[in-house]
Amino acid sequence: MKTMLKLSLAATLLVATGVVCAANPAALEKDNPLKPIPKSPLGIDSNLSELKDPPTPERVRLGRWLYFDKRMSADSTIACATCHHPEHAFSEPTPVSTGIRGQKGARKAPSFINQAWTIYPHFFWDGRAASLEEQALGPVANPIEMGNTHEAMISTLQGIKGYAKYFKEAFGTGEITKDRVAKAIADYERTRLSGNSPWDKWRDGNDSAVSAEVKKGHELFFGKAVCNQCHLGQNFTDSLFHNLGVGWDADAKKFKDAGRVAISKKDEDTGAFKTPTLRDIAKHAPYMHDGSQATLRDTVVHYNKGGTPNPHLSPKIKPLNLTEDEITALVKFMEALNGEGYMDTEPKSFPK
C-alpha cells in the first residue's frame, strides 16, 4: 500500500510539473532521436564542424532533454525553455523573466541563436559569463530564476536512473557532473542556427526575395542610420556593451540597472548592455534589456532621438534625423531578417 501511494504521489507530481517520463529507451529515442549536426543556413559562413570542440549528436540529444526538463529547478517548475521559447527565437515575449514562485527578474531573456560564433565571448546582457557553458549553469543557481544549487541539480539528475545511459553515450561514462550538464545544454544551444531569411536570399542574388522598402531599409541600416557600427557581421552584433540611456532615471540621476559596470568595474560601462543579435528580432518583442521598448518601431525611434541623455551615453549614439518613412523602412529591413533552422518543440517524454 505504501509503495502504491508513493508511486501515485510521484505520478501526480510529474503531471503537475508537466514532465512526462518514460522508462523505455526505445520510446524515448523515437521521441528524441539522434540527428546529424546541422549545416549552417544561407547567410552564416561558418560551420559547427569548424569549432575547436564541435557538438556531437549524442551531446545535443542529451542537452535537448536537459534544456526542456523542469526537474533542473528547485521546485520542478522552471526549465531553460521557460524563458527562452523556441517560438520566440529562444527569447521571450515579456519585458522580464519569471522564475520559481512567480518571482520577476529585472531583465528580459535574450536570444542565443547563432551564439556558437561570437566576436567576443560575452554572454548575458552584462557579459558576466565567458562561454555558453558558463551561461547555461547561471540560471540554475539564481535564486529568482531556477532557484536551485548545482549540487542539488546533480543529485536530482543522479536520481533519475534513465539519464545515466545518455550521459554515457555523450561523454563515455554515466557520471553526471555540472560540467557535463553545461556542455550538453550548450551544445544543444549551438545547434540553434538561423539564416536563409528573405534578406539573405536577396543578398544571394534573388532580387524578388524582399520588397523595395526592405532594400531602402538596408541602405539606411548601412548608411544614414549607421546601425552597423554596433550591429555588424553575419549575426548583426559586436558582442560589446553600449549605453543607450535605457533605464536612466533623470530625477534620481542614476540607472535602475547599472549594467556592465558591475562586472567590468569600469566607470564608462555604467548603464551599458550587450548589443543583441538582430537575427529573428521581430520574433521577440518587447526590446532592450528591460523590455521597455514595446515594438521595433519604438526602438528605432529611441535611436533616432539620440537615446536618453545621461553622463555615460555612448558617443556612438546621436540623433539620426530619420523621416517617418525611413523609420518604417528600417523596421521592414529588420523584419526581413526572420530566418529558419532553429525551431524546435519540447520533447514529449523524458528519462525516468
Image (cartoon, rainbow, N blue to C red):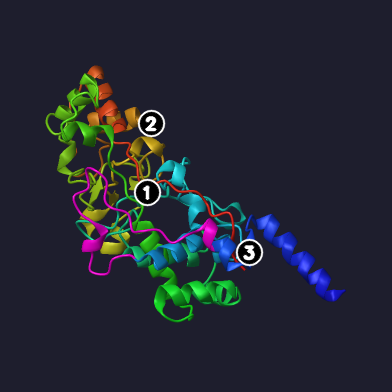
Secondary-structure class at tag 2: loop
Q: Which residue is under mark 1?
A: 111
Which amino acid type corresponds to the residue marked 1 in the rendered image?
Ser
Q: Label 1 near label 2: C-beta < 8 Å? A: no
**Which residues, given as a range, are shown in magenta?**
29-55
Compare residues 334 and 56 and report the one nearer the observer.
Answer: 56
Compare residues 342 and 266 and report the one nearer the observer.
Answer: 342
Q: Quadrant of the C terminus?
A: bottom right
Q: Residue at x 34, y 39 (%)?
A: 280
The overriding secondary structure of the stretch rendered in magenta is loop
Q: Position of residue 37 (x, y in %)?
A: 33, 58
In the depicted structure, whether residue 51 falls above or below residue 38: below
Q: CA distance from mark 3 to mark 1?
A: 30 Å
Q: Which mark is residue 22?
A: 3
Residue 31 located within the stretch drawn in magenta: yes
In the image as oriented, which residue stretches furthest toward the left?
223
Q: Residue at x 81, y 75 (%)?
A: 3
Mark 1 Cα within 10 Å, few/some/many (few <14, many 20+)? many
Q: CA distance from mark 2 to mark 1?
A: 16 Å
Residue 142 located within the stretch drawn in magenta: no
Q: Earlier in the sequence, mark 3 or mark 1?
A: 3
Report whether residue 100 is seen: yes
In the depicted structure, whether residue 116 falls above or below residue 227: below
Q: Earlier in the sequence, mark 2 or mark 1?
A: 1
Give the mark toward the camera: 3 or 2.
Answer: 3
Q: Label 1 near label 3: C-beta < 8 Å? A: no
Q: Position of residue 96 (x, y in %)?
A: 47, 46
Report whether residue 146 is seen: no
Q: Which mark is residue 234?
A: none
Q: Which residue is under mark 2?
A: 295
